[in-house]
Amino acid sequence: MTVRVLLVSTTGMGDCLWGTPGIRALKKTFPEIEIDLVVNKSWKSLFDFNPYLNKIFEYYSEWYLQPFLGIKLLGMHYDAIYLFHTNRDFRRLLPWLRSSSVWCHQNFDWIPESHRMKMDTTFHGVQRRLIMLENFGVKPDGGQMEIFFDQATLDRSQQILKSHNFSPGKYIYLNLGASVEKKRWKLECFIELASQILKKTSWNIMLGGGGPDDQKRSQAILNQLNSPRVSTDCMCSLMVSASIISQAGLMVTSDTGPMHIGLAVKTPVVALFGTISPTGSGPYEIADHLCRVITIDPEDQDSFNVENPDEYHIKSITVNRVWEQVEKMLANNSSP
Protein backbone atom coordinates (compact mmCIF):
# COMPACT_ATOMS: atom_id res chain seq x y z
CA MET A 1 0.00 0.00 0.00
CA THR A 2 1.37 3.42 -0.99
CA VAL A 3 2.32 5.72 1.87
CA ARG A 4 1.07 9.28 1.36
CA VAL A 5 2.31 12.38 3.17
CA LEU A 6 0.95 15.92 2.97
CA LEU A 7 3.23 18.91 3.55
CA VAL A 8 1.71 22.33 4.27
CA SER A 9 3.49 25.63 3.58
CA THR A 10 1.14 28.57 3.14
CA THR A 11 3.04 31.69 4.18
CA GLY A 12 5.87 33.71 2.58
CA MET A 13 8.03 32.82 -0.41
CA GLY A 14 11.10 32.18 1.71
CA ASP A 15 9.08 30.14 4.22
CA CYS A 16 7.91 27.92 1.37
CA LEU A 17 11.35 27.50 -0.22
CA TRP A 18 12.80 26.55 3.17
CA GLY A 19 10.79 23.35 2.84
CA THR A 20 12.55 22.15 -0.32
CA PRO A 21 15.49 20.47 1.49
CA GLY A 22 12.93 18.56 3.58
CA ILE A 23 10.96 17.53 0.50
CA ARG A 24 14.14 16.20 -1.11
CA ALA A 25 15.25 14.37 2.04
CA LEU A 26 11.83 12.78 2.53
CA LYS A 27 11.74 11.41 -1.03
CA LYS A 28 15.35 10.21 -0.98
CA THR A 29 14.85 8.43 2.34
CA PHE A 30 11.58 6.82 1.25
CA PRO A 31 11.60 6.66 -2.58
CA GLU A 32 8.20 4.91 -2.79
CA ILE A 33 6.38 7.57 -0.77
CA GLU A 34 3.91 9.97 -2.42
CA ILE A 35 4.37 13.57 -1.29
CA ASP A 36 1.62 16.13 -1.79
CA LEU A 37 2.02 19.83 -1.01
CA VAL A 38 -0.39 22.58 0.00
CA VAL A 39 1.34 25.85 -0.87
CA ASN A 40 0.47 29.54 -1.04
CA LYS A 41 -1.05 30.16 -4.48
CA SER A 42 1.41 32.99 -5.15
CA TRP A 43 4.41 30.64 -4.98
CA LYS A 44 2.96 27.48 -6.53
CA SER A 45 4.91 27.94 -9.77
CA LEU A 46 8.17 27.57 -7.81
CA PHE A 47 7.15 23.96 -7.10
CA ASP A 48 5.40 22.95 -10.32
CA PHE A 49 8.41 21.07 -11.69
CA ASN A 50 9.78 19.66 -8.43
CA PRO A 51 10.34 15.97 -9.26
CA TYR A 52 9.84 14.86 -5.66
CA LEU A 53 6.22 16.02 -5.46
CA ASN A 54 3.10 14.13 -6.48
CA LYS A 55 0.24 16.64 -6.25
CA ILE A 56 0.29 20.36 -5.50
CA PHE A 57 -2.72 22.16 -4.03
CA GLU A 58 -3.07 25.94 -4.08
CA TYR A 59 -3.84 27.61 -0.75
CA TYR A 60 -5.98 30.75 -0.73
CA SER A 61 -6.06 32.91 2.39
CA GLU A 62 -9.61 34.10 1.64
CA TRP A 63 -11.94 32.08 3.87
CA TYR A 64 -14.65 31.78 1.23
CA LEU A 65 -12.24 30.04 -1.17
CA GLN A 66 -10.87 27.54 1.34
CA PRO A 67 -13.81 25.07 1.08
CA PHE A 68 -12.77 24.42 -2.55
CA LEU A 69 -9.39 23.22 -1.29
CA GLY A 70 -11.13 21.33 1.49
CA ILE A 71 -13.24 19.38 -1.01
CA LYS A 72 -10.09 18.34 -2.90
CA LEU A 73 -8.39 17.21 0.31
CA LEU A 74 -11.48 15.40 1.55
CA GLY A 75 -10.95 12.62 -0.94
CA MET A 76 -7.33 12.08 0.11
CA HIS A 77 -6.10 9.97 3.01
CA TYR A 78 -2.67 10.78 4.39
CA ASP A 79 -0.54 8.66 6.67
CA ALA A 80 0.96 11.86 8.07
CA ILE A 81 0.58 15.62 7.63
CA TYR A 82 3.44 17.98 8.44
CA LEU A 83 2.70 21.67 8.84
CA PHE A 84 6.01 23.09 7.61
CA HIS A 85 4.75 26.65 8.11
CA THR A 86 1.26 28.08 8.17
CA ASN A 87 -0.96 30.48 10.09
CA ARG A 88 -3.96 30.17 12.33
CA ASP A 89 -6.38 30.43 9.41
CA PHE A 90 -5.34 26.96 8.27
CA ARG A 91 -7.29 25.49 11.18
CA ARG A 92 -10.43 25.99 9.10
CA LEU A 93 -9.23 23.15 6.90
CA LEU A 94 -8.62 20.64 9.70
CA PRO A 95 -12.13 19.09 9.43
CA TRP A 96 -11.40 18.33 5.75
CA LEU A 97 -8.12 16.50 6.43
CA ARG A 98 -8.19 12.70 6.55
CA SER A 99 -5.29 11.86 8.83
CA SER A 100 -4.90 11.08 12.51
CA SER A 101 -1.30 12.29 12.47
CA VAL A 102 -0.90 16.06 12.05
CA TRP A 103 2.39 17.54 13.23
CA CYS A 104 3.75 21.07 13.56
CA HIS A 105 6.71 22.96 15.03
CA GLN A 106 4.68 26.11 15.69
CA ASN A 107 2.82 26.51 18.97
CA PHE A 108 -0.73 26.15 17.64
CA ASP A 109 -3.30 25.46 20.34
CA TRP A 110 -5.50 23.71 17.75
CA ILE A 111 -2.90 20.98 17.32
CA PRO A 112 -2.62 18.47 20.22
CA GLU A 113 0.32 19.36 22.41
CA SER A 114 1.78 15.89 21.89
CA HIS A 115 2.06 16.70 18.17
CA ARG A 116 3.69 20.11 18.64
CA MET A 117 7.45 19.76 18.35
CA LYS A 118 9.21 22.19 20.65
CA MET A 119 12.35 23.66 19.12
CA ASP A 120 14.94 26.27 19.97
CA THR A 121 13.70 29.63 18.71
CA THR A 122 17.15 30.34 17.22
CA PHE A 123 16.91 27.42 14.79
CA HIS A 124 16.80 28.38 11.14
CA GLY A 125 13.57 27.75 9.21
CA VAL A 126 15.24 25.09 7.06
CA GLN A 127 16.58 23.39 10.16
CA ARG A 128 13.14 23.31 11.83
CA ARG A 129 11.58 21.49 8.89
CA LEU A 130 14.42 18.98 8.70
CA ILE A 131 14.21 18.26 12.43
CA MET A 132 10.47 17.60 12.10
CA LEU A 133 11.10 14.96 9.46
CA GLU A 134 14.24 13.58 11.11
CA ASN A 135 12.14 12.59 14.13
CA PHE A 136 10.29 10.19 11.82
CA GLY A 137 13.31 8.54 10.29
CA VAL A 138 14.07 10.93 7.44
CA LYS A 139 17.78 11.36 6.72
CA PRO A 140 18.69 15.01 6.03
CA ASP A 141 20.31 15.64 2.65
CA GLY A 142 21.82 19.03 3.42
CA GLY A 143 20.15 22.43 3.64
CA GLN A 144 20.43 23.58 0.02
CA MET A 145 17.11 24.92 -1.25
CA GLU A 146 16.22 24.23 -4.87
CA ILE A 147 13.97 25.29 -7.74
CA PHE A 148 13.37 23.29 -10.92
CA PHE A 149 12.68 24.93 -14.29
CA ASP A 150 10.82 23.73 -17.35
CA GLN A 151 12.28 24.29 -20.79
CA ALA A 152 9.67 26.90 -21.76
CA THR A 153 10.70 29.09 -18.80
CA LEU A 154 14.38 28.75 -19.64
CA ASP A 155 13.69 29.61 -23.27
CA ARG A 156 11.67 32.69 -22.30
CA SER A 157 14.37 33.99 -19.96
CA GLN A 158 16.99 33.47 -22.69
CA GLN A 159 14.85 35.47 -25.11
CA ILE A 160 14.59 38.35 -22.65
CA LEU A 161 18.34 38.39 -21.99
CA LYS A 162 19.09 38.25 -25.70
CA SER A 163 16.69 41.13 -26.41
CA HIS A 164 18.76 43.30 -24.04
CA ASN A 165 22.10 42.00 -25.32
CA PHE A 166 22.79 40.42 -21.93
CA SER A 167 24.75 37.18 -21.64
CA PRO A 168 24.28 34.61 -18.85
CA GLY A 169 26.72 35.12 -15.98
CA LYS A 170 27.68 38.61 -17.14
CA TYR A 171 25.16 40.82 -15.35
CA ILE A 172 24.35 41.84 -11.78
CA TYR A 173 20.76 41.45 -10.60
CA LEU A 174 19.57 44.25 -8.28
CA ASN A 175 16.39 43.23 -6.48
CA LEU A 176 14.63 46.49 -5.63
CA GLY A 177 11.59 45.21 -3.76
CA ALA A 178 10.56 43.81 -0.41
CA SER A 179 7.27 42.85 1.18
CA VAL A 180 7.40 45.75 3.66
CA GLU A 181 8.86 49.24 3.42
CA LYS A 182 11.29 48.78 6.31
CA LYS A 183 13.08 46.03 4.35
CA ARG A 184 13.58 48.16 1.22
CA TRP A 185 16.93 49.76 0.64
CA LYS A 186 16.56 53.40 -0.41
CA LEU A 187 16.07 54.12 -4.12
CA GLU A 188 18.90 56.66 -4.02
CA CYS A 189 21.22 53.94 -2.69
CA PHE A 190 20.37 51.61 -5.55
CA ILE A 191 20.98 54.44 -8.02
CA GLU A 192 24.36 55.22 -6.48
CA LEU A 193 25.35 51.55 -6.38
CA ALA A 194 24.32 51.04 -10.00
CA SER A 195 26.32 54.12 -10.99
CA GLN A 196 29.43 52.70 -9.34
CA ILE A 197 28.95 49.37 -11.09
CA LEU A 198 28.69 51.10 -14.46
CA LYS A 199 31.70 53.34 -13.83
CA LYS A 200 34.05 50.84 -12.23
CA THR A 201 33.18 47.57 -13.97
CA SER A 202 32.05 46.25 -17.34
CA TRP A 203 29.12 44.34 -15.83
CA ASN A 204 25.55 44.90 -17.03
CA ILE A 205 22.68 45.44 -14.56
CA MET A 206 19.25 43.78 -14.43
CA LEU A 207 16.71 45.47 -12.17
CA GLY A 208 14.14 43.20 -10.55
CA GLY A 209 11.09 43.20 -8.30
CA GLY A 210 7.54 41.97 -8.63
CA GLY A 211 5.31 44.70 -7.19
CA PRO A 212 3.88 47.90 -8.74
CA ASP A 213 6.17 50.02 -6.57
CA ASP A 214 9.13 48.03 -7.86
CA GLN A 215 8.19 48.86 -11.43
CA LYS A 216 8.14 52.56 -10.53
CA ARG A 217 11.48 52.29 -8.73
CA SER A 218 12.94 50.41 -11.67
CA GLN A 219 11.77 53.03 -14.14
CA ALA A 220 13.20 55.80 -11.96
CA ILE A 221 16.62 54.12 -12.06
CA LEU A 222 16.40 53.55 -15.81
CA ASN A 223 15.54 57.22 -16.33
CA GLN A 224 18.34 58.39 -14.04
CA LEU A 225 21.10 56.22 -15.51
CA ASN A 226 19.95 56.20 -19.12
CA SER A 227 22.33 53.41 -20.07
CA PRO A 228 21.95 50.46 -22.48
CA ARG A 229 23.76 48.38 -19.87
CA VAL A 230 20.78 48.61 -17.50
CA SER A 231 17.50 46.77 -18.02
CA THR A 232 14.58 45.37 -15.99
CA ASP A 233 12.56 42.17 -15.64
CA CYS A 234 9.87 43.68 -13.39
CA MET A 235 7.10 42.70 -15.83
CA CYS A 236 8.10 39.02 -15.98
CA SER A 237 6.40 36.06 -14.34
CA LEU A 238 7.82 34.74 -11.08
CA MET A 239 9.44 31.71 -12.71
CA VAL A 240 10.97 33.70 -15.57
CA SER A 241 12.41 36.17 -13.03
CA ALA A 242 13.75 33.21 -11.03
CA SER A 243 15.42 31.88 -14.18
CA ILE A 244 16.95 35.29 -14.90
CA ILE A 245 18.24 35.41 -11.31
CA SER A 246 19.73 31.93 -11.77
CA GLN A 247 21.79 33.17 -14.74
CA ALA A 248 23.10 36.32 -13.04
CA GLY A 249 26.73 36.56 -12.03
CA LEU A 250 25.76 38.30 -8.78
CA MET A 251 22.62 39.42 -6.97
CA VAL A 252 22.19 42.32 -4.53
CA THR A 253 19.01 42.11 -2.49
CA SER A 254 17.41 42.87 0.84
CA ASP A 255 15.97 40.19 3.12
CA THR A 256 13.00 39.19 0.96
CA GLY A 257 11.58 36.37 -1.17
CA PRO A 258 13.83 36.82 -4.23
CA MET A 259 16.87 36.58 -1.93
CA HIS A 260 15.84 33.00 -1.20
CA ILE A 261 15.41 32.37 -4.92
CA GLY A 262 18.99 33.54 -5.45
CA LEU A 263 20.23 31.23 -2.71
CA ALA A 264 18.16 28.33 -4.06
CA VAL A 265 19.60 28.62 -7.59
CA LYS A 266 23.16 29.14 -6.26
CA THR A 267 23.66 32.64 -7.63
CA PRO A 268 26.23 34.60 -5.57
CA VAL A 269 24.25 36.93 -3.29
CA VAL A 270 24.97 40.09 -1.30
CA ALA A 271 22.11 40.18 1.20
CA LEU A 272 21.09 43.25 3.22
CA PHE A 273 19.44 42.68 6.61
CA GLY A 274 17.97 45.60 8.49
CA THR A 275 14.93 44.46 10.46
CA ILE A 276 15.79 41.04 11.83
CA SER A 277 18.83 38.91 12.49
CA PRO A 278 19.90 36.68 9.60
CA THR A 279 20.50 33.81 12.04
CA GLY A 280 17.00 32.38 11.82
CA SER A 281 15.93 33.52 8.37
CA GLY A 282 19.03 34.29 6.35
CA PRO A 283 21.33 32.05 4.32
CA TYR A 284 21.59 28.49 5.66
CA GLU A 285 24.59 26.28 4.94
CA ILE A 286 25.69 28.58 2.10
CA ALA A 287 29.40 28.82 1.25
CA ASP A 288 31.08 32.22 1.75
CA HIS A 289 31.87 32.57 -1.95
CA LEU A 290 28.12 32.35 -2.69
CA CYS A 291 26.82 34.79 -0.09
CA ARG A 292 27.83 37.84 1.92
CA VAL A 293 25.45 39.21 4.56
CA ILE A 294 25.40 42.89 5.52
CA THR A 295 23.58 43.93 8.69
CA ILE A 296 23.00 47.33 10.25
CA ASP A 297 25.95 49.07 11.92
CA PRO A 298 26.67 47.90 15.49
CA GLU A 299 25.92 51.37 16.87
CA ASP A 300 22.44 51.10 15.34
CA GLN A 301 21.63 47.76 16.97
CA ASP A 302 19.53 49.43 19.67
CA SER A 303 17.18 50.67 16.96
CA PHE A 304 15.74 47.17 16.69
CA ASN A 305 13.62 48.08 19.70
CA VAL A 306 12.39 51.54 18.81
CA GLU A 307 8.67 52.26 18.66
CA ASN A 308 8.60 53.23 14.99
CA PRO A 309 10.51 50.53 13.08
CA ASP A 310 9.79 52.08 9.68
CA GLU A 311 12.15 54.97 10.40
CA TYR A 312 15.42 53.06 10.58
CA HIS A 313 17.00 49.69 9.98
CA ILE A 314 18.10 49.09 6.41
CA LYS A 315 18.51 52.81 5.74
CA SER A 316 21.65 52.75 7.88
CA ILE A 317 23.40 50.38 5.45
CA THR A 318 25.61 52.59 3.28
CA VAL A 319 26.39 52.23 -0.41
CA ASN A 320 30.10 52.02 0.40
CA ARG A 321 29.56 48.95 2.58
CA VAL A 322 27.54 47.23 -0.13
CA TRP A 323 29.98 48.18 -2.90
CA GLU A 324 32.86 46.78 -0.85
CA GLN A 325 31.16 43.38 -0.73
CA VAL A 326 30.12 43.56 -4.39
CA GLU A 327 33.77 44.16 -5.36
CA LYS A 328 34.90 41.17 -3.29
CA MET A 329 32.24 38.89 -4.75
CA LEU A 330 33.06 39.94 -8.30
CA ALA A 331 36.73 39.27 -7.65
CA ASN A 332 35.96 35.81 -6.25
CA ASN A 333 33.63 34.79 -9.05
CA SER A 334 33.87 34.85 -12.82
CA SER A 335 33.78 38.23 -14.55
CA PRO A 336 32.72 39.34 -18.04
Image (tube, rainbow, N blue to C red):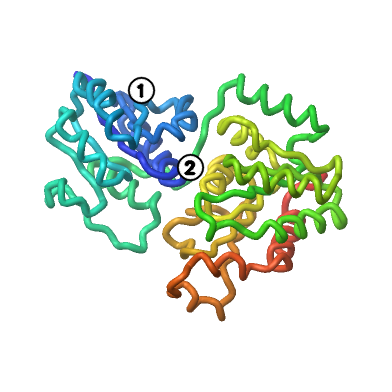
Residue 173 circle label: none
Query: Does residue 218 sit above or below 197 in this rendering?
Result: above
- Pick whichever, 69 or 298, lies toward us: 69
Label total for image: 2
Three-letter residue code for mark 2 = Met
Q: Earlier in the sequence, mark 2 or mark 1?
A: 1
Residue at the farthest bottom position: 299
Residue at position x 59%, y 43% in the image:
266
Tell me the residue at 30%/62% (across/down).
120
Coordinates of residue 125 in the picture (x, y in percent): 39, 52
- The answer to which quarter of the image holds residue 192 is bottom right
Which quarter of the rendering shows the C terminus? Answer: top right
Badge 2, how many Cα within 10 Å: few under 14, some, many 20+? Answer: many
x, y percent for residue 191: 75, 56
The percent coordinates of residue 86 (x first, y second) are 31, 44
Circle 2 SS class: loop
Instruction: Using the image, determine if residue 11 lies above or below residue 71.
Output: below
Identify the residue at image location x=20%, y=28%. Answer: 78
Residue pictured at 71% horizontal, 61% vertical: 189
Looking at the image, residue 84 lies above or below residue 158? below
- Disc 2 vs disc 1: Cβ atoms closer than 8 Å? no
Label 2 – label 1 distance at C-alpha: 18 Å
Residue 163 x, y percent position in the rendering: 79, 27
Q: Nearer the viewer, residue 283 or 306?
A: 306
According to the picture, the residue beneath numbered tag 1 turns out to be 54
For disc 2, the marked residue is 145
As drawn, is 115 to the left or to the right of 5?
A: left
